[in-house]
Image (cartoon, helix red, strand yellow):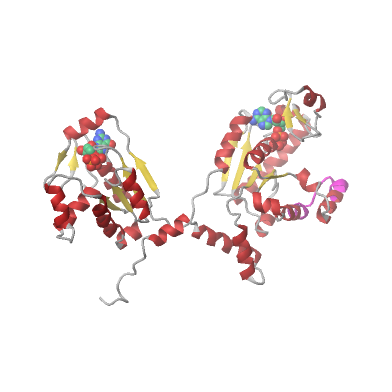
Amino acid sequence: MDATSAPHRIPAEMPQYGEANHIFELMQSMLEQLLIHQPQDPIPFMIEHLHRDNDHVPKIIILGPPASGKTTIAMWLCKHLNTNLLTRGTLLGKEFSSVAEEARKQYQRFKKVPDSLLIQLVQERLMEEDCVRRGWILDGIPQTREQVLMMQTLGLAPRHVIVLNAPDSVLIERNLGKRIDPVTREIYHTTFDWPREAEVQNRLLEPEGISEVETARKLLEYHRSIIRILPSYPRILKAISADQPCVDVFYQALTYVQTSHRSNAPFTPRVLLCGPMGSGKSLQAALLAQKYGLVNICCGQLLREAVEDQSKLSELIQSFFDKEMTVPDDIILKVLKGRLDRPDCVHKGWVLHGFPRDLDQAHMLASMGYSPNRVFFLNVPLDSILERLTLRRVDPVTGERRSPGVFPSPHF
Ligand SMILES: Nc1nc2c(ncn2[C@H]2C[C@H](O)[C@@H](COP(=O)(O)OP(=O)(O)OP(=O)(O)O)O2)c(=O)[nH]1
Ligand SMILES: Nc1ncnc2c1ncn2[C@@H]1O[C@H](COP(=O)(O)OP(=O)(O)O)[C@@H](O)[C@H]1O
């Protein structure tokens, strides 16, 4: 077969390099920004985007009905993640901004800020250095589908959206106890979250718009709009019940925003199964290989095949077998490298078991550039292992291992 028709051998380290350095995600994010902003000259835009490297900063939206705890949770998340909190109040109160000044005028005259003006304020704020560098949390924005569409058009995309929910009756009751510290702008509650310091207690103010009627009106407005907003965030949305202690809501929200979403990047599984003899490595490896189309590599089997194949190393390996000595690590690695570099392992991925058996071997495997992206340790009590190994039987023809009562091997 001439070289042009031979299968293209992608070096094993290439997909691993891409995975380790998130190349796919980097390119995907840059392409998204290019298509959204369509810069006159893409080259400096891409260079600036890559230098900015803010693909991993928090970009969070917290939505929910009044008194669900949006501001409380947003403030706690901001402190914990050291990021920026954006609320309607902070956006409208922005100084040295003609957009904010216009928005304040509109609010004073009509008690409402036009969607376009509010989203323009958001865009202006998100482009500031601190939001670019440390990310942001939007509290209660967007409030309408029109605002969502405007944000999407401007490329203002969150990475995580949290929607708090609780029964209206709970929220109406809860809002009555809301209090604000005029100095720190911290939110408190007369029953659920009362400050310890007397000085703070004495200066707390009852905010406007927390009466039963007012809260009921806002709830009606919220229920009307939220059902048109949520479909815009299908894969990055997490609903959390706000009818539980603040701290529980906070930790569920924190756990969610600290998880990264499943990447669209091509993924080649490189699975390592570790565990004592009889823990089921071979059986699980066969099941994984069958389910995910992986190459099943049992180190012991590989060495036996190397002997049968009359390879260069076969006599050397056979000599260790004959003396019932362990084969030296460097010989095992040579055999392993030859197998892991084959196109089927590079393209389909592999599940390896029986090696490494100790830290030195693990370091040697990594130093050769074979880093697994999933490692499982099969932990089985000693008595179960003894029972399995004593009952284990091996098929002399197929080499399959079976124990009475264990489901048929995946080959049937
Ligand atoms: N009850 C039970 N038996 C299992 C399970 N997995 C494997 N076995 C049985 C099948 C085998 O006869 C015996 C040992 O399984 P394996 O040969 O897959 O274990 P492993 O490859 O870890 O042993 P090795 O280190 O190669 O000697 O235990 C399991 O999940 N439950
Ligand atoms: N999970 C919760 N349990 C009890 N009280 C809460 C909870 N979350 C918030 N609160 C209290 O409810 C009131 C409204 O909270 P806030 O964060 O202002 O809600 P939102 O910003 O959604 O209107 C505050 O007094 C706050 O202390």
Residue 77 horizontal/vertical position (percent): 64, 39
Q: Decide if residue 168 is in sight here.
A: no
Is 41 located above or below residue 36 in the figure? Answer: below
Is 115 located above or below residue 213 in the figure? Answer: below
The picture quadrant where one finds residue 207 is top right
Residue 360 horizontal/vertical position (percent): 33, 46
* 285 left or right, relative to 322: right
The residue under the point 65% across, 64% down is 37
Residue 110 shown in magenta? yes
Residue 308 horizontal/vertical position (percent): 14, 56
* 75 left or right, relative to 96: left
The number of callouts visible is 0
Which residues make up the magenta segment?
A: 106-119
Q: Decide if residue 37 is in sight here.
A: yes
What main secondary structure does the magenta stretch of the protein show?
Answer: helix
Along the line of sight, the residue nearer the viewer: 314 or 65? 314
Q: Quadrant of ligand 1?
A: top left
The picture quadrant where one finds residue 43 is bottom right
* 49 left or right, relative to 357: right
* 236 left or right, relative to 100: left
The residue under the point 78% across, 22% down is 198
Residue 349 horizontal/vertical position (percent): 34, 55
Q: Quadrant of the N terminus?
A: bottom left
The residue under the point 16% across, 55% down is 316
Residue 71 shown in magenta? no
Along the line of sight, the residue nearer the viewer: 331 or 400? 331
